């Protein structure tokens, strides 16, 4: 635990040091914005390809072709989900939540992109519709669809409670990726990565600045839709926390299914190229 009081006396210019202006680390002005008009045109002609149902406290994977769309819907009771994305041709290229957070902020909505890890670092998907975009920020500093939480996992559960729970999102995604690819659990697990917490309402407390969750505002029929920038494997876990208004990583919460609908467009599409950095690293 952190001490209640600092161990050192503030210097005489402490207030002046704290008053330095905040500077955005990664200004995105130079990034080409998503072409929303082109995406809307593609979406209008896209046809439904398949539906993937994610059972409560479980996960599934499905594929989405570049230039297509996928929609995550809450079809029943309030339920949050943990989302992983992989390149369908190279599992080492997967969603990079930390860099996405640095570029777009702690919570995502329409127009934000989900970026892949180094060395490719390119858009994997773009959010095109968000029925919860009205929520904004609440009085606790909470918002929806965060890229700050990592995913509930059995290792933290063992560390904090001393018990094993196998239906947390990390384990769910591991099983789903293994089933989808034919890999063993041991082979699949290293590819499971930090997530976009779909529909989850989270923030940081004002006093201790700890990560918090509260009951999701999602209701039946709400959805988050994405445009696939590259050929994707999409993995989604229906979190054992249900709406995450109480706790996760247990069987106590009421949990419900989630649905992924995939829409495919016949119009030609060229995926963004991998990052142009030459990887010389100064040598």
Image (cartoon, rainbow, N blue to C red):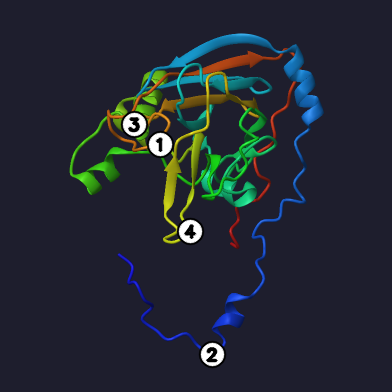
| Circle 1 SS class | loop
| Circle 4 SS class | loop
Identify the residue shown where x is 42% and y is 27%. Answer: 237
Q: Are marks 1 and 4 in contact (CB under 8 Å)?
A: no
Return the residue nearer the eye: 145 or 28: 145
Above or below residue 109? Residue 71 is above
Q: Are marks 2 and 1 in contact (CB under 8 Å)?
A: no
The Cα atoms of the two marked residues, 3 and 2, are separated by 56 Å
Give neighbour class at mark 1: few <14, some 14-19, many 20+ (Cα, 10 Å). some
Residue at the far bottom: name it. Answer: 12
Identify the residue shown where x is 68% and y is 46%. Answer: 276
Any part of residue 88 in sight:
no
Q: Quadrant of residue 229?
A: top right
Give neighbour class at mark 2: few <14, some 14-19, many 20+ (Cα, 10 Å). few
Residue that badge 4 annotates: 206
Residue that badge 2 annotates: 12
Image location of residue 7, percent across then percent down: 36, 81
Return the residue nearer the eye: 4 or 65: 4
Residue that badge 1 annotates: 245
Image location of residue 142, percent across then percent down: 53, 46
Identify the residue shown where x is 75% and y is 46%. Answer: 31
User: Left or right of 144: which side holds 2?
Assistant: left
Residue at the far left: name it. Answer: 162
Q: Earlier in the sequence, mark 2 or mark 1?
A: 2
Residue that badge 3 annotates: 187
């Amino acid at each position: 635990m952190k001490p209640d009081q600092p161990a050192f006396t503030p210097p005489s210019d402490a207030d002046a040091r704290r008053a330095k202006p905040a500077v955005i680390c990664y200004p995105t002005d130079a990034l080409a914005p998503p072409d929303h008009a082109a995406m809307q045109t593609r979406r209008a002609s896209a046809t439904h390809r398949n539906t993937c149902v994610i059972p409560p406290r479980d996960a599934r994977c499905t594929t989405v072709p570049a230039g297509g769309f996928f929609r995550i819907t809450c079809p029943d009771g309030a339920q949050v989900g943990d989302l992983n994305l992989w390149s369908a041709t190279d599992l080492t290229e997967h969603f990079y939540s930390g860099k996405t957070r640095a570029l777009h902020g702690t919570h995502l909505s329409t127009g934000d992109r989900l970026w892949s890890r180094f060395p490719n670092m390119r858009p994997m998907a773009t959010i095109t519709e968000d029925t919860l975009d009205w929520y904004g920020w609440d009085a606790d500093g909470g918002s929806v669809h965060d890229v700050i939480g990592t995913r509930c996992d059995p290792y933290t559960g063992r560390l904090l409670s001393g018990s094993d729970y196998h239906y947390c999102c990390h384990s769910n995604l591991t099983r789903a990726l293994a089933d989808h690819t034919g890999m063993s659990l041991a082979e699949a697990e290293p590819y499971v990565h930090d997530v976009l917490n779909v529909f989850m309402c989270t923030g940081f407390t004002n006093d201790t600045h700890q990560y918090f969750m509260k009951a999701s505002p999602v209701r039946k029929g709400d959805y988050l839709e994405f445009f696939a920038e590259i050929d994707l494997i999409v993995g989604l876990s229906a979190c054992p926390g249900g709406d995450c208004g109480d706790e996760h990583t247990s069987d106590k919460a009421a949990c419900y299914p989630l649905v992924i609908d995939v829409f495919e467009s016949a119009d030609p599409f060229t995926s963004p190229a991998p990052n142009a950095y030459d990887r010389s690293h100064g040598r």
